[in-house]
Image: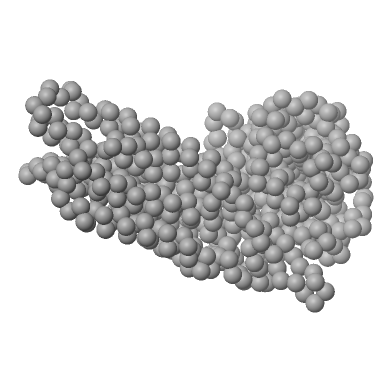
Amino acid sequence: MPFALIFISGGAILALELLASRIMTPYFGVSLYIWTGILSITLVSLALGYWWGGRLAGGRQPATDRKLGLLFAIMPGLAGIAIVAACLLYPYAFLPLARWSLIGGAFAACMILLFLPLVATSAMNPLLVALLLRRQAAHKTAHEGDAGSGMVFFVSTLGSVAGVIVTAFLLIPNVSNFTAALLVALLLGVLSLTAAALPKLPMYGRGAVTACGIIAMMGAVLLAWQGDNYTGRQGKIAFSGGQWQVEGTHGSLFGTVKILRSGTDGDGKFLRVYFHDGLIQNAVDSNQRSIVFYTYALEALTRAYQPQPQQVLVLGLGAGIVPSRLARDGARVEVVEIDPASLAVAQHYFGFDATRITTHQADARTFVSDCTPRHDVVLVDLFHGDGTPDYLITREFFRDLRRCLTPGGIAVFNTFVDLENQRAYAHLLATLTSELPHVAMYRQDHRPDARQINSYLVAAPVPLPVPQRITMTDAPKRYASALLDMLAKPQTVGGEHTASGKIIHDAWNAAALDMAASQSAFRRSVLDTTPAALLMN
């Protein structure tokens, strides 16, 4: 039975680490910094836990069997209580921490979520080794050379593997990250109760172990039960100049999607927003018409360079508005989307008709690596966290993308540029032009104080045709003139745009730090306008 406890506690360690990354993403983004914090704090916590467990078991006055049993049995309960305390704290602490510093705040957030639970659970391993040594000495048996420590860490590590699998494929798709963390705390409380009930485990203070387990369990259950009231995440939330209600939440391995719905006006009209880990991906009115400029910008650029697109490949589904509009006018559209939650949300809330559009649940990089040159347009709208994942902006990816295009085909990109750190964008442009050398860049007029803006790119391996003048008759009136102004001012991407850029390869990303800084700036702009109740998932 002690080995079963070690197995389950090992699973709890990795489950909590995996959940920490998802809990922190809306606040700190997806970058080098968050994973540096998670891995660093995890390893430091484990090291300290192993050291502390060894000190408790040995030291100047080695612990008795009954004290070892007490310490071993109470650790899961203490870890569970620490997780409950972290869940009480983080919904209100993480936003101020992120606004203070994305790097320092990420490390502090990791300490809150991981440090005490991981120290306590990892201390169980040397304590069990000490118990095994005492048992061997009591029975006067010749103990193994490693005193059983190899088996202890073997079982704990297998438990960690099981914890990752259960968390990824059972907890994350079905419950919120807040609830999943509390389930881990509940399980750890059960472990302490189980240990207290083991008659063969020598121990004094069984009542204290039992109480600790009950406190962890009751705290987890009560907080999960009253979580919505405690955090305010299900009430009306003030955001972007209006009052919003969370209409639906969909979790997957790729983040948490929330559907926000505004109140209805006197005519029964409302707005609906696709909100993914702190970012607005799209928004529509009650007639399913997009109210986001980029939707019309991507379509307008497509039609300006390919007035009658026949075969369109869209990388990144989101709410499915752009592919739906292109398919409506007769184009044969294929969509590649890695996140199954996106397809479910697009169909249920945004009118996406999967029977009219061929949809592939796949990674865009894998899909284009086996792509045939049958597409006259490839639309690239790939984001995760605060930017496009590194492996989707390498020279090798753009080389594969070029092979997807028919002769005369074009690729249209939706990207973001940090106007105060254009070196990061120069890396993207340098990499793109290394495979698709003819690039036109379009940007909407923006406020002088704007820092992060959309930057649209049209790229091709051969010289681009002269764009045709088009009219988007069904675009919102407030966008009509802005679209015409943007289309009238293309910039040819040349040496002045790419001079400071380095080409990004699969094997080497010399731009990683510049891009992380740009993504951090974008996340800070999100934190300035987004309430804590929406960031929590």
In the rendered image, which quarter is residue 494 located in? Answer: top right
Q: Residue 445's x, y, as percent?
A: 76, 60
Q: Residue at x 55, y 60 (%)?
A: 535
Q: Residue at x 66, y 68 (%)?
A: 244
Q: Residue 504's x, y, as percent?
A: 60, 34
Left or right placement of residue 182 versus residue 324 in this view: left
Q: Residue furthest bottom?
A: 266
- Is 6 situated above or below 399? below
Q: Residue at x 43, y 44 (%)?
A: 15
Q: Residue 373's x, y, as percent?
A: 81, 26
Q: Nearer the viewer, residue 376 or 504?
A: 376
Q: Quadrant of the C terminus?
A: bottom right
Q: Nearer the viewer, residue 252 or 412?
A: 252
In the rendered image, which quarter is residue 144 located in? Answer: top left
Q: Quadrant of the N terminus?
A: top left
Left or right placement of residue 192 versus residue 167 in this view: left
In the rendered image, which quarter is residue 142 located in? Answer: top left
Q: Nearer the viewer, residue 482 or 238?
A: 238
Q: Residue at x 86, y 35 (%)?
A: 311
Q: Does residue 419 appear anywhere in the picture?
A: yes
Q: Residue 48's x, y, as percent?
A: 26, 44
Q: Does residue 431 appear anywhere in the picture?
A: no
- Is 391 situated above or below 140? below
